[in-house]
Image: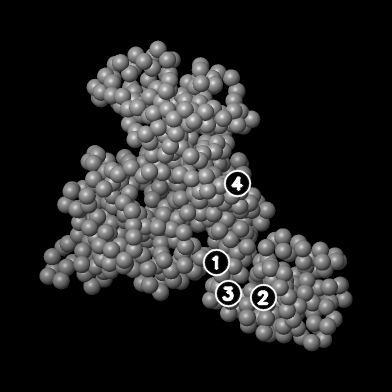
Amino acid sequence: MLDYAELDAPDPLYVLRHSCAHVLAAAVMELWPDTKYAIGPPVENGFYYDFEFSKPVGEADLPRIEARMADIIARDVPFEQVLLPREEVAARFRELGQDYKLEILEHEAAGDPVVSCYRTGDFFDLCRGPHIASTGKIEAFKLQKLAGAYWRGDEHNRQLTRIYGTAWPTRRELDEYLTALEEAEARDHKRLGKELKIFALDERTGPGLVLWLPNGATIRRELERWIVDEELARGYQHVVTPVLAKLALYEQSGHWEKYHDTMFPPMRTDEGEAYELRPMNCPHHILVYQQELHSYRDLPARIAEIGNMYRYEKSGELMGMIRVRSIALNDAHIFCTPEQLHGEILAVMDLARYFMETLGVSDFYYRLSVRDRDSSKWAGTDEQWQAAEAALAEALESVGVRYVLGKGEAAFYGPKIDFQVRDAQRREFTNNTIQVDFQLPERFDLEYVAADGSRQRPVMVHRGAFGAMERMIAFLIEHYAGDFPTWLAPEQVAVLPITDAHLDYARCVAERLRAARIRVELDSRSERVGKKIAEARSRRVPYMAVVGGREEEAGTVQVRNRAGEQSSEPLEEFVGRLVTEIAERRR
């Protein structure tokens, strides 16, 4: 069994940023005393605090707020925890006119007779902590931007002003982070996705619903072919299942009860039946498994699909292709015996590593996501959870990888290994996951025939070895800064005749490349070849094949790559080199 005491140790960076959020609020209250303050948590790479200002506050005010924060830090004000009776805290916030704190107190601390608060000089906040000893311990921070944020994330509530900042233990680390952020913004997938004609978002389809343009569809298709071929080679069976089902299916699986707030509303038919867009693929794969009675000899059964799922994410949380409402997930579910579980977990880890290494993804770590102490949030018995957590921990330890524990990050039906990836903008997200589930086999009465003829329950492993197409391609756009490796590039070669007199040979070159299944575009415009080269480079084409009279006579091509390197090669040699590069998926 995992030692949950380990999970309660505070992260020093979390504590630092939490403390900096309080300093931000203290500074705002000194500058605008009639402001109402809401919440101010630490987040990945920084912190924020939400405010309701009586008059507009904008980006131009950030230096002023920073200066007041620096003054509070220079005063070295202590962070003092005070434990007070709940009614006394409520009276204090009523006197201060802090309605949001009163609402938090009413909903989240209703049963607590004593409430934890923190005082930082004159600033008083409802907070469990922990915090650093005093403001003087903050050495490096920066306010970054303002944004609108609905109270409690509900668009029906008042919109507040959210001020974002970042804090680091040293000035050097802060400077490195800000430099990396500037470089990452140049790679932003929303800008490059539009510039390179990869995807679009259109209000006429609705927020968070991606239109895959031809270039993006090409990248996605290449990835899907690769994934499916690799999974078939590793013993998976690929299926196609409906994107919707009767609501009763998700009631049986527990998804409706747990996630109905983030699911699309049910669709009612004339016959009175309710249908639902699926938020998960697992119930559908269970139905595939149940189409026949399996023997232990048939197991493991690995059922895979690149399946579309739908989630009604709040409009304020949508972002490009990173956070969307329609998701194509590289999903699979493995049904196995308890004895096979260890080997299946290791095999999924190996597959995920293969996918990530091929794509050049190296900035990731493993997280073992487990329950917290709130038993009401988790389905199943303690014994089942302990067995599942132990199986995942044993797999991680057997391959010698380091991992962190994620308290309360488990799925409601079981613990999981998460592959936590950092993108070019240093945002962290869960890309791949391995979840051990004893619950859904119970809910759906899944069985297999054991060696002794008895009916036994299989263990179910939920597995995403590649991730969602939308999120992963957004990641890859930024990871490669738009310069996709040749095997993924929508346009692999641009054939550029020097003059119209060389068009016939240019067509022959293009046809030979197409015959080798290389994606090629012939630029037949009557433009200067220098302009054609510049435009091909702006499209991030890996190779340009420039042809003129000399090349036509010799049967060669003048090759330029994106880096500006040039060479003259026989056409067949060039074709062979590209075919090998593409087949080997070289980066």
- Amino acid beneath label 1: Glu
Residue hosting label 1:
222
Using the image, tell me which numbered label, if any, was put on residue 27: none
Q: Residue at x 50, y 57 (%)?
A: 472
Q: Disc 3 versus disc 2: distance between alpha carbons? A: 13 Å
**Does residue 537 show up?**
yes
Q: Which residue is mark 4?
A: 201
Marks 4 and 2, how far apart at CA: 31 Å
Q: For residue 514, which numbered disc appears in the image?
A: 2
Question: Is disc 2 surrounded by few (<14), some (14 to 19) or many (20+) residues within 10 Å?
Answer: some
Q: Amino acid at mark 2?
A: Arg
- Quarter of the image holding residue 306? bottom left
Please state the horizontal and vertical placement of residue 82, each as a whole percent of the image.
Answer: 31, 24
Q: Give the residue type at disc 3.
A: Ile
Q: Is residue 269 visible?
A: no
Query: Mark 4 is on which residue type?
Result: Leu
The CA distance from mark 2 to mark 1 is 16 Å
Residue 303: quarter of image: bottom left
- Label number found at residue 582: 3
Vertically, is 528 above or below 287? below
Q: How is the image coloured?
A: one colour
Q: Residue 30, percent across and down?
A: 51, 21
Which of the two marks, 3 or 2, is nearer to us in this view?
3
Is 437 positioned to the left or the right of 563 in the image? Answer: left
Going by the image, does 245 lie left or right of 201? Answer: left
Q: CA distance from mark 4 to mark 3?
A: 30 Å
Earlier along the polypeptide chain: callout 1 or callout 3? 1
Crowding at dot 4, Cα within 10 Å, few <14 / some 14-19 / many 20+, comes out as some
Q: Marks 1 and 3, Cα distance to the nearest angstrom? A: 11 Å
Where disc 1 sits, the SS reads helix
Q: Nearer the viewer, residue 253 or 7?
A: 7
**Circle 1 or circle 3, nearest the eye:** 3
